[in-house]
Image (cartoon, rainbow, N blue to C red):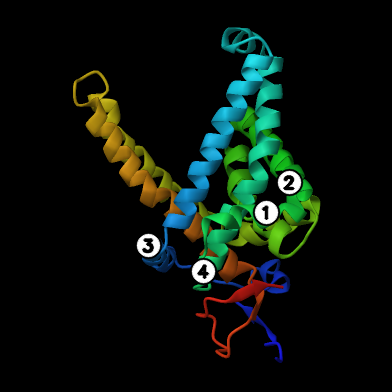
Amino acid sequence: MEKQPFIHIGGSLERAVQGDYTLDVKSVLQEAWQKTQQNRASINGGLAFIMLLGMLSSFLLTEYFGGFEQVYQQPQLMLIVQFIVTIIIWPFLAGVEMMGVLHAINAKTHVNLIFAFFKRASWVIICALLTSILISFGLQLLIIPGIFLAVAFSLTIPLVVEKKLSPIKAMIISIQALRFQWFKLFTLYFLISLCLVLSLMPFVLLAESSLAIVGLVIFIFALSYIAPLFYNVKGILYREIFGLTIQQTSTNDHADSDDVFLA
């Protein structure tokens, strides 16, 4: 059977670093919300697995280093625990990031996609560590540099996975491209963060009452939409700014096929 040709969807690296792309905050949110309503189970399932893995890893490492009090009293041990947990969870988080990218081209995803990108695990881990260090350093300086870098580095992982760039190259290209529409990107992330804060308010207000469980249920329910919305927004942004190349396995040459492979 003859293979379907590769097709490119959305922007490109060449145009992105020149600022040759447009973003509309309202349109991105509307599309991301639609995709979240259609398909959020895979992202939620992946994040649930990652959260449990992170909690288990943190517990085992903390016990290994002498317990919570011992680790809490020694910042260097806390950093070691955080470093190891980051190494453990980020290869799986890369899969969640790519779920958002695939949703942006109307491809269906499944929870097991979090295991699909281990071939790029070393580059993903290095990229995650480097960006985290630089963002933390920026926040400690004057806060604003850290916020700028957090937005500017927000699409580095898909660049490492889908474009197969090195961590340094992905970071450089991400800054070069995202600086042109930084305020719109910041607005998108800020609105999602605001939704997260507002969803947490019932739990905070009811924390010391007998209705605390109600506040917690409200937060978890809201989070089951907000988390997929965040990754779907990032996927749409990646499509519009950098684009992606896929190969379809069906006879349909449109991007709404369920059967697509990243090039």
**Figure check: 98 above or below 243:** above
Whichever of labels 3 and 1 marks the residue nearer the N terminus, that label is: 3
Residue placed most toward the observer, 257 or 187: 257
Residue 127 is labelled as 2
**Figure check: 60 above or below 120:** above
Mark 3–mark 2 Cα distance, whole angstroms, equals 28 Å
Q: Is residue 2 left or right of residue 204?
A: right
Q: Which residue is mark 3?
A: 33
Mark 4–mark 1 Cα distance, whole angstroms, equals 17 Å
Residue 214 is labelled as none
Residue 10 appears in the rendering: no
Q: Which residue is mark 4?
A: 104
Residue 57 on image: x %, y % = 62, 29
Residue 119 placement: quadrant: bottom right
Residue 156 is labelled as 1
Q: Is residue 114 left or right of residue 163?
A: left
Query: Helix or strand or loop: what does disc 4 sit on?
Result: loop
Mark 4–mark 2 Cα distance, whole angstroms, equals 23 Å
Q: Is residue 34 left or right of residue 53?
A: left
**Figure check: 62 above or below 121:** above
User: In this view, which residue lies farthest toward the front?
Assistant: 1
Mark 4–mark 3 Cα distance, whole angstroms, equals 11 Å
Query: Helix or strand or loop: what does disc 1 sit on?
Result: helix
